[in-house]
Amino acid sequence: MNVDAIAKYRNYLLPIMDSISIIFGYYFMSVLITDSFLMHPTSAVTRNEILISIVLAIMVYQVVFRLSKRYTNIIRYENNQDYILYIVLSLVSSIIVSLIEELGLHMINPSIKLNLIIGLLIGIIMLSYRMIIRYLLLYDVANKGINYTVENPKKLLIVGGGYSANDIIKTLNSTLKGEYHIIGIVDDNKKRIGYSVAGVRIIGNRNDIVKICEAENVDEIFFSIVNIDNKNKKEILEICSKTNAKVKVLPSLIELITEENLYQSLRDVSIEDLLGREPIELDNHNIKNLINDKIVLVTGAGGSIGSELTRQIMLYNPKQLILLDNYENSLYDIELELKTLHPNNDIRAVVANIREQKRLDAIFDKYMPEIVFHAAAHKHVPLMENNPTEAIKNNVFGTYNLVNCSDKYKVKRFILISTDKAVNPTNIMGATKRLCEMIIQAKNRESDTEFVAVRFGNVLGSNGSVVPLFKKQLAHGGPLTVTHKEITRFFMTIPEAVALVLQAITYAQGGEIFVLDMGEPVKIYDLAKSLIELSGYRLGEDMEIEITGMRPGEKLYEELLMNEENLHETNHKKIFITESMDFTMEDVEKKLDMFREIIDNEHATKDHIKEVIKNCVPTYKEPEEVNGE
């Protein structure tokens, strides 16, 4: 009978085959073990008992198997758990048969031990032909499935010899037959070398990747290890980048929990894979105590940081969440997302401009927020260099307005999202953010509200960052643009940065600037080079990196700490506190008066604005002074 017939008639075929197995099991074992069928003088009785046992067993097995829905299983997709269940159900059925024989039929020689042995044999027989049928079905699918007629299949090397590699190989052999020629597997477990996974040999470890790729002209590398620390992942990917092969990676184990087809989960290498940062551990209990059942307001709620703040804040069940933003489209998107995920929570979207004091007064008076996260800001350095008054209006006076409202309406805690560009700034954006830090530290000295700031570097994937730009440039065939070959930046993922912000504020007492550990600084040029190579391109041949020159206000190296600041540790290894600077609101108001004159006069020159900034922010320097140009 062919496999099509097996699939079509399995509802009838399997119960018949199971019944034949039962007949064979009882007859064979009765003859083999009791010996009574051939030699016992009362063999006629024994024959009747065997016949009764067979009929009874067929009935019991059919009931048990149908109740457990074994006949509704699709054999092709059965697994080890199903196979174990067949054995267990056979043993259970055999026990039921013995009990009926002894208690119901009062048979002369019922034997639970004999029935258990017979049940085990029947279970093994059932399991065996089901496995044969499964193999025939899978073999038939592999031969009838998608069969690409590729003259030159891609040569593939797989990194990692675990379960994921096994599933990927099976998928390639069944649905992408002929598309790939698998050269082999590399695995760091030396004991596995020489063994095979799904018929593919393990031919080396990570140190052999470059040699194998060169010798075999490998086209693609599949990184199939999902349960690996980020440091090792980064190291292996760096080795892969030295080859000419395009690299695809499986996401982390958590991302794969709901994914059945591992091959479809393979994705291109992302910059996050190259950073080698370990996952962050949080004290969720303290964060929950801070946010749970509180009214929380987030400014810039539609932006990269603001939207992620709202997502993570909702995990701690605030009493009410107010989303404040001036850009209605992004505000609408995050409101819709949060209300879909948290339909029973009180979420309010408010369109407002933080420059307008009266509008903010009305919002604070209406909602009475207890915690304010201030993420709204103009952050794009070159744009703010060319539009300095807008940076001052939005960043400095927008923060000033929010600080005054928070003090007036008795906000418990105010958190400013700051930036490493506020440290020894060389641009107007950074200088305005430094002024924001000065405002909150000065206000904290005279207010019951606890004003704090959290300072961190670049976040991957944020609006205007280098990562989306690189991805677009790769998609368009390059070149990738870098402003200077030596330029370095600190990087962190958006969820990681926001998680640390939430953790940091649990340590706040007021007046602190929290500094996040951003890890090692990364050269942008090296990042671009690795991304090109791991995408299967050759630098200088298939894809170029173009050095465009430093942009206005840009410096080569960012810092997280000024010379006059000292760091103190917190209970979290990635969060530090700077010493508070000695500012008063009287000092700050004098500085703000200078800026009021500037924004009242839209004709102020950029040079004049910079002179005022130098007077107000003593650590401000021209980029040439810092970059050594």
Image (tube, helix red, strand yellow):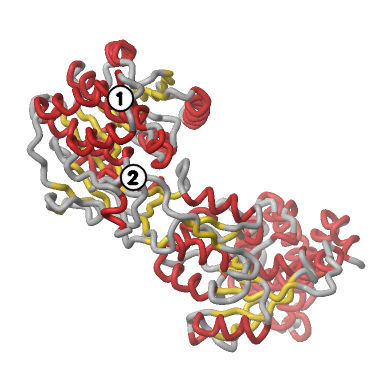
Which of the two discs, 1 and 2, sits closer to the camera? 1
Residue annotated with mark 2: 499
- Is 308 or 9 nearer to us in this picture? 308
Where residue 488 appears, as percent x and y from the top left, is: 37, 59
Task: Give the residue type that dot 2 points to.
Answer: Ala
**Quarter that holds the C terminus:** bottom left
Q: Which mark is residue 398?
A: 1
> For the point 55% across and 85% down, which residue is it?
204
- Is 216 or 41 nearer to us in this picture? 216
Q: Quadrant of residue 42?
A: bottom right
In the picture provided, is 553 more to the left or to the right than 246? left
Q: Quadrant of residue 315?
A: top left
> For the point 63% across and 68% down, which residue is it?
536
> For the point 67% across and 54% down, which residue is it?
64
Answer above or below: position of 329 versus 506. Answer: above
**Total number of numbered discs in the rendering:** 2
